[in-house]
Image (spheres, coloured by chain):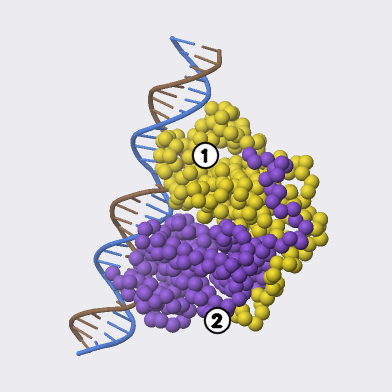
Chain colours: A yellow, B purple, C blue, D brown
Amino acid sequence: MASATRSSSLSGRSSARVPAGQGSRFDRRLAKILEHATEVFCEKGYEGASMRDLSRASHMSLAGLYYYFDSKEKLLYLIQKYTFSTILGRLRERLEGVEDPEQRVRIFIQNHLEYFLANQKAVKVLSHEDDVLKNGYGSEIAAIKREYYRICLKLVDELKGAQGLEFSSRIAVLSLFGMMNWIYTWHNPRVDADAGELAREMGDIFLHGICRGRNSGLQTKRASGPKVRVM
Amino acid sequence: MASATRSSSLSGRSSARVPAGQGSRFDRRLAKILEHATEVFCEKGYEGASMRDLSRASHMSLAGLYYYFDSKEKLLYLIQKYTFSTILGRLRERLEGVEDPEQRVRIFIQNHLEYFLANQKAVKVLSHEDDVLKNGYGSEIAAIKREYYRICLKLVDELKGAQGLEFSSRIAVLSLFGMMNWIYTWHNPRVDADAGELAREMGDIFLHGICRGRNSGLQTKRASGPKVRVM
DNA sequence: ATAATCCTAGAACGAACGTTCGATAAGCCC
DNA sequence: GGGCTTATCGAACGTTCGTTCTAGGATTAT
């Protein structure tokens, strides 16, 4: 009967971060369950993970889980919302006071990758279970996502304006997201660089990619030349 | 008892493309089922799609399906293998005879995007259900995937050598894959450009990105400067 | 001490799951 | 026309699914 409508910070209106060390006992317990659930969803996928898997991972009975949330779908919603809100919150903090357009784009990339690598599992659940949430839950997450995209688009547009560049912002931004989000499929902490280094490298590729240099020895726009068969 | 061990071209040794218009009756029928299944997997995900969903989509009874393949997992395997083999085959065809390193990279991008947009659903199943296949099936698909990656890496390395560039090939290639593969999450044929145009734009971003121009007005390597908080 | 509230678990619910069985036509060889 | 093989089906198998019911131990308030 209770079930997550009562919580003050995790499932309630507040979007502040809940570092799993404060809040009521209920909140703390729920946060722990969310952590475990994130891990299981990450490993087996949302549909592939059963409530019994979650109960095992949380060291709690099947029925006990339902005291903290009222459906599997709502659990996914809570995970996604919490994760996304945190990324967005941190980004806003960091952008504050920084004026230089290039710097702002680099901050975006840095913030994104840093969170992605520090919370790889949560982020995989966010990316991979993108469209399983239905109706109300789904559209709320989609709205946050759209807001996040809009911010990135604005940053890129500002850089474009400041440097007088010409390119499709939409494709540029979506390509950037592609680069960054794809990381969850390949990043291996034992082999690959850390977030800072990756942010620099991807930032370089992206920023130089948009700023068309003319001394790079490239034959620009030859892709649809005679040698490439188009089907 | 029969079940897909018998087929000549789809599940057999041949990796040639099967345009669903030739081959035995069995092969043609199976190809049709694969098409329908691809659509359902794309919409509901592998775990989310039930055999009953597939039987409805294929206009065939539940039991009838099992005449053509012997498990849901094998069905996914067939879809992934066929899709991937086709991309790889076309790529090899197109690379033949082309020498210029930049051109070869552009061909790779063009080939990839063209197939992605023409077979968006199949490709989503390929990307999205990446790690659900277990043991034998999984490792076979993984091997094809590795081979594909290896080819791209070689192309980029050749370009790198030809132009005397300095960057991490691994990160560059994986970023490129990210850009391209992410498309399935956002591309809208009514709004976005076609494969040729996208290949040109992404090719430009990627190629200019790895060829560090010095006249782009960028302040390179400032990301880890004083203004960016690293956690 | 007693009442109220919080928290947890065992057992069960009906529904849906992937898969198999046995039967049944239809088409072909001899 | 009898005996294969091919192709399809309805019905059922045993299992697992998400969820709920009920009851009782633990904790807190009075």
Q: Position of residue B139 (x, y in %)?
A: 40, 61
Give the amino acid at mark 2: Gly
Left or right: residue A171 versus residue A51 is right
Quarter of the figure that contains the C terminus of chain B:
top right
The residue under label 2 is B97
Disc marking residue A34 = 1
Residue at mark 2 to residue at mark 1: CA–CA distance: 55 Å
Q: Residue at x 34, y 65 (%)?
A: B70
Q: Residue at x 56, y 33 (%)?
A: A20
Left or right: residue B117 versus residue A156 is left
For residue B158, which quarter of the picture? Answer: bottom right
Dot 2, crowdedness within 10 Å: few (<14), some or many (≥20)?
Answer: few
Q: Position of residue A115 (x, y in %)?
A: 60, 44
Q: Residue at x 44, y 68 (%)?
A: B81
> Could you tell me which secondary element the residue under label 2 belongs to?
loop
Give the amino acid at mark 1: Leu
Q: Position of residue B32 (x, y in %)?
A: 45, 74
Does residue B207 appear in this view?
yes
Q: Position of residue A197 (x, y in %)?
A: 61, 49
Circle nearer the viewer, 2 or 1: 2
Left or right: residue B45 versus residue A225 is left
Question: Do residues under tags 2 and 1 come within 8 Å of each other at their CB atoms?
Answer: no
Q: Residue at x 53, y 65 (%)?
A: B153
